[in-house]
Amino acid sequence: MNQGKQIVDILEKEKKLSLEMLRELLETEDADTREYLRERAEAVRLSVYGNAVYIRGLIEFTNYCKNDCHYCGIRRSNRHVERYRLCKEEILDCCKAGYELGFRTYVLQGGEDMYYTPERLCDIIRSIKSKYPDCAITMSVGEQPAEFYRQMYTAGADRYLLRHETADEVHYGKLHPKKMSFSNRMKCLQSLKEIGYQVGCGFMVGSPYQTVETLYQDLEFIRSFMPHMVGIGPFIPHKETPYADREAGTLEMTLCLLSIIRLMHPHVLLPATTALGTIHPLGREKGILAGANVVMPNLSPVEVREKYLLYDNKICTGDEAAECRHCMEQRMEKIGYKVVVDRGDYK
Ligand code: SAH
């Protein structure tokens, strides 16, 4: 058996890797090793979640943001974005459409927008929960005070997505403005967990200044933090950001990392992201076949989709929610998987 395959077997058995093993898996050009890694990850995923694919309805409810992350298209210094906010009724309309389409999780994502005070946001969460008590709510509104996280949880939010972005402090500093700190990011993730949320962390693959060493730290962080979800997708440059001229992350590297994360953490909820679908027409399908078990079709009103561009060439910005939902079902069926009507909790 070749060395690459041996590494995959060790990873599956011990659920961890050394830096040198990670380097070998990320850099190998051996097609057999890559395919073996994918096969093992898919087998593990099938043993825990079967061929079910969980769907989350993504509602991008505001693109105002007080932050200035160097990679993100809706950063505050981008003056070319037409800013928008959805009101409670518009958000509830998205939920209604989503419910009829079989969504049982709503993801409320946005920039860090001070307009949504704890009062306003908790009122929205309570309204969704009272209309759709059988649905889970995932919040993704960045770094907030622990008290605000607690209020949202009490109002009914079940899960929280806050990608750590990188577990290397120096690297973190290169991706973010001086005002933001790695220690606060980590503190936020800890509070979310303590409060009782199902928590998701994650990072972009191929972000500027990322190295095998920083990726190794990401994997070590994930192993110790034990999140319920891990969101990873390729970095894709946005033309109005300081990293406009950087290369995008690759399909191969993203798939390799999805498989590694599945093998390290057999039960984790792992999305095949829209960014992955953006760099390759079959990116999400390949992501599922590499061990992912979640997809997040867009439920945002079509009028605002072109305004929520975190990166260039984002897909599905012109499609109605129903089209996205049916398109996803067909895509999954073609590869032998089934979109299910389910909250899709961590097993
Ligand atoms: N403001 C919230 C949620 C919106 S950003 C937050 O900070 O959590 C959601 C995620 O999109 C980020 O965590 C980041 O990893 C990803 N993202 C932002 N810009 C991107 C880009 N140019 N390419 C790929 N992913 C990007």
Image (cartoon, grey):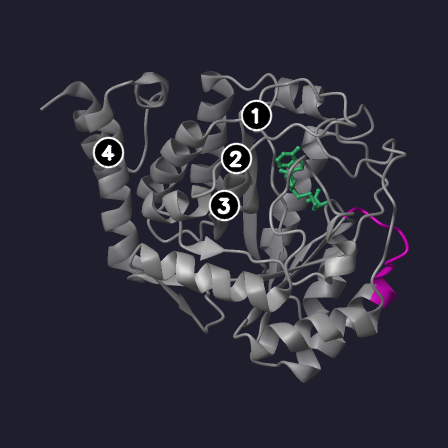
Q: Which residue is mark 1?
A: 248
- Three-letter code for the amino acid on which mark 2 is drawn: Ile
- Three-letter code for the amino acid on which mark 4 is drawn: Glu
Q: Point out residue 339 in the picture as x, y percentages from the top left corner.
A: 41, 66
Q: Point out residue 218 in the picture as x, y percentages from the top left corner.
A: 50, 30
Q: Which residue is mark 2?
A: 279
Earlier in the chain: of badge 1 and badge 2, it is 1
How far is mark 4 from mark 1, CA to CA? 23 Å
Q: Is residue 69 left or right of residue 57?
A: right
Of all residues, the one furthest to the left in this rendering is: 1
Seen from the viewer's position, the closer of residues 104 and 277 is 277
Seen from the viewer's position, the closer of residues 345 and 298 is 298
Labels 2, 3: front one: 2
Labels 1, 3: front one: 1
The magenta segment is 111-120
Q: Are marks 1 and 2 in contact (CB under 8 Å)?
A: yes
Earlier in the chain: of badge 1 and badge 3, it is 3
